[in-house]
Amino acid sequence: MKKTESLLLGIIAALGSLAAIATVAVTIQIFTSGEKWVFTEAYLYAPSFVVIAILIEELSKYIFISKKIAPRKNRRAVADAIFFGLGFALVESSLIFFSNPIAENIARGILETSMIHISTSAIIAGTITADYLRSNAGKILSAMVPAIIIHLAYNFSILHGMDIQASALSALSSLSAIAILITSSKRNQVF
């Protein structure tokens, strides 16, 4: 798979996730608000909704990566997943760019968002292509759980104003993605 295809798949996955998240948000709001339906932006930052959004995003990544990028243990799956994660991050970064007028927040938000989505995509691809996992359930859990935990920890640190922890977490997740890429390249020709 070409890098541009992976990038475009990441954009498509992010847009699909965004549509699914919006649908869930509106549905929950309609069923929980009674007669008077009012959607507020604060609802999007509720911890329970953040968990739902992350589950949707990471499941979308898993489905696209397992079906399109690494269906037959492609030798270049992790490298392609990095471009997939970049495409995913481009969509989310554009939302940050257009919703936050403070320049320093834009740069940090885009960089950290990119690092989180690229690293979780690499983790998912690295796990899917790992030889030691035989069962589908093992692959799904081994791929999803670390990606969800990293993403949840990052988002909750941002929500609670812990910017230093969020930056450290995004850097550590990037290092883990690099380690997966190096490990994968030792097994196969990656680039």
Image (cartoon, rainbow, N blue to C red):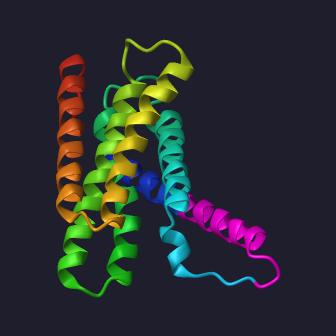
Q: Is residue 149 left or right of residue 181?
A: right
Residue at the right extreme? Answer: 35
Boundaries of the magenta span:
16-36
Residue 31 showing in the rendered view: yes
Query: Looking at the picture, how far across and down is residue 6, in whole percent?
Result: 39, 48
* Displayed quadrant of residue 126: top left
Q: Residue at x 23, y 76 (%)?
A: 105
Query: Looking at the picture, how far across and down is residue 177, in whole percent?
Result: 24, 38
Q: Residue at x 20, y 24 (%)?
A: 183
Quadrant (top left/top right/bottom left/bottom right) for the N terminus: top left
Residue 2 showing in the rendered view: no
Whether 26 is drawn above or below 37: the answer is above
- Residue 20 among those drawn in magenta: yes
Main SS class of the magenta portion in the image: helix
Front position in the image: 36 or 142 = 36
Q: Residue at x 51, y 77 (%)?
A: 42
Query: Looking at the picture, how far across and down is residue 60, in whole percent?
Result: 53, 47
- Residue 32 among those drawn in magenta: yes
> Exactly how many numbered labels are in the figure?
0
